[in-house]
Image (cartoon, rainbow, N blue to C red):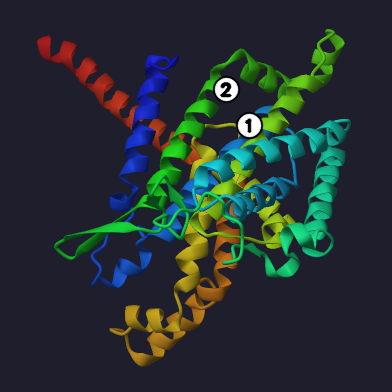
């Protein structure tokens, strides 16, 4: 189906099902439960999962397949956001023109930056991309203020043109009348499930770009990118010019990043230079490495893992901790709260850093490798049981 093998088709259908059922799967605890703190099924966080999943999938095409480590992909994220907000200002709040412009402009930026940066490889390529990203950040922050509105950020004002805005047009981002920030709530017992238009819009786009990445992984182009990662020098010796392939991977990756930035502005009609900072570029690197570089699901798992910690663990404050440990004696309660304080709330980065160190040391292939090890252990256990039954049968017959 859709040019995929039976195994890949099954895999894609599983991904589609998990994506569409996310509002239910991320609400495992009733709203009244003390563990409801760990629920992640609210619209803003689910949208971030999908958007940064797209960002990480695109980065994985460059880094995971080709082996080129870019520290400047946040530039395309910011360019995509600015493109969408400018379409809001000029045309109206329909997200489609802005997303199309975001993909086109980010592709042109990626072509320009990649053409220069790919003249070098290794750490020199990484430094060049970082330099370009910081240059774009400074241009957006203090030089191109007529286009970016500087440190205040680009936003829509009532005196903007918006030539396609009608009398009954929505006054917030929408997809042909389907408003992004509108939701439907489903109450079942103590559970409350929120089905948000914006999440499903980004989720469907995420499924489409995941399918595209799956086709790239299985294509001759993807095999060439893997060959470049394995030994680019040997390919050059055979007479193959690898630069068009690496440049194509860089442009595709930049388009993914621009689309992700455009979706961020589609959920919140605001674009700022902070989205182009080097920290955003470093974050997507962590996502891909944590999930598993060069794998299909790794970037998505890594993006979800980091965004979950950023939004859930960062909100666990002393009041929440007191609610958890209230049944303990005062001395023990205060001790546990004092220890936990270093790992949650404002200190959530420490917990994420420790987990990242453990994954890098014990699971070089990321979270995907961890899942594969668990699956292999179950298979060995099952096959061991089958072998034992097979050996027992002849003795019983005798």
Residue 366 can be seen, yes or no:
no
> Closer to the camera, 386 or 120?
120
239 sits left or right of 317 in the view? right
Of helix, strand and loop, which one carries label 1?
helix
Q: Which mark is residue 61?
A: 1
111 sits left or right of 13 in the view? right
- Outermost residue on the left side: it is 397
> Closer to the camera, 367 or 132?
132
275 sits left or right of 127 in the view? left
Residue 396 can be seen, yes or no:
yes
Question: Circles 1 and 2: CB distance less than 8 Å?
Answer: yes
Q: Is residue 170 above or below residue 216?
A: below
Picture residue at 43% right of the left edge, 87% below the top: 334
Of helix, strand and loop, which one carries label 2?
helix
Residue 227 image position (x, y, % from top left): 70, 18
Q: Is residue 232 above or below residue 73?
A: above
Picture residue at 26% right of the left edge, 62% below the top: 29
- The first of marks 1 and 2 along the sequence is 1
> Closer to the camera, 298 or 382?
298
Residue 141 image position (x, y, % from top left): 78, 63
**How would you rate the neighbour count of disc 1 (Cα within 10 Å): few for under 14, some for 14-19, many for 20 or more?**
many
Q: Quadrant of residue 40?
A: bottom left
Residue 34 image position (x, y, % from top left): 29, 73
Picture residue at 46% right of the left edge, 79% below the top: 317
- Outermost residue on the bottom side: it is 330
Picture residue at 38% right of the left edge, 46% below the top: 200
The residue where tag 2 is placed is 216
State how far apart marks 1 and 2 are (Cα). Answer: 8 Å
Residue 175 image position (x, y, % from top left): 43, 46
């Amino acid at each position: 189906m859709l040019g995929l093998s039976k195994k890949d088709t099954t895999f894609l259908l599983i991904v589609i099902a998990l994506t569409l059922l996310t509002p239910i799967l991320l609400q495992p605890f009733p709203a009244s439960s003390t563990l409801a703190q760990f629920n992640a099924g609210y619209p803003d966080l689910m949208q971030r999962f999908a958007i940064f999943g797209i960002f990480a999938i695109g980065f994985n095409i460059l880094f995971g397949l080709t082996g080129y480590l870019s520290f400047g992909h946040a530039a395309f994220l910011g360019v995509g956001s600015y493109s969408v907000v400018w379409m809001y200002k000029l045309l109206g709040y329909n997200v489609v023109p802005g997303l199309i412009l975001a993909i086109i402009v980010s592709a042109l930026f990626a072509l320009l930056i990649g053409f220069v940066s790919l003249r070098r490889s290794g750490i020199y390529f990484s430094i060049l991309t970082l330099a370009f990203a910081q240059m774009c950040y400074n241009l957006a922050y203090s030089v191109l203020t007529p286009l970016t509105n500087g440190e205040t950020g680009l936003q829509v004002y009532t005196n903007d043109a918006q030539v396609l805005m009608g009398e009954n047009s929505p006054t917030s981002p929408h997809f042909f009348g389907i408003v992004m920030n509108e939701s439907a709530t489903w109450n079942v017992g103590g559970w409350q499930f929120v089905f948000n238009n914006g999440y499903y819009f980004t989720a469907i786009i995420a499924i489409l770009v995941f399918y595209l990445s799956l086709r790239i992984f299985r294509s001759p182009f993807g095999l060439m990118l893997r060959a470049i990662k394995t030994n680019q020098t040997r390919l050059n010796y055979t007479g193959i010019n690898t630069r068009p392939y690496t440049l194509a991977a860089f442009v595709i990756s930049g388009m993914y990043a621009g689309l992700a930035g455009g979706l961020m502005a589609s959920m919140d009609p605001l674009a700022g230079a902070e989205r182009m900072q080097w920290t955003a570029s470093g974050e997507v690197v962590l996502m891909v490495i944590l999930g598993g570089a060069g794998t299909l699901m790794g970037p998505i798992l890594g993006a979800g893992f980091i965004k979950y910690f950023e939004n859930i663990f960062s909100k666990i404050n002393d009041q929440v901790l007191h609610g958890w440990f209230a049944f303990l004696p005062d001395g023990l309660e205060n001790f546990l709260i004092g220890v936990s304080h270093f790992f949650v709330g404002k200190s959530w980065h420490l917990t994420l850093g420790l987990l990242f160190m453990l994954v890098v040391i014990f699971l070089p292939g990321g979270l995907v490798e961890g899942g594969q090890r668990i699956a292999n252990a179950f298979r060995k256990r099952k096959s061991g049981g089958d072998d034992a039954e097979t050996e027992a049968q002849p003795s019983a017959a005798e």
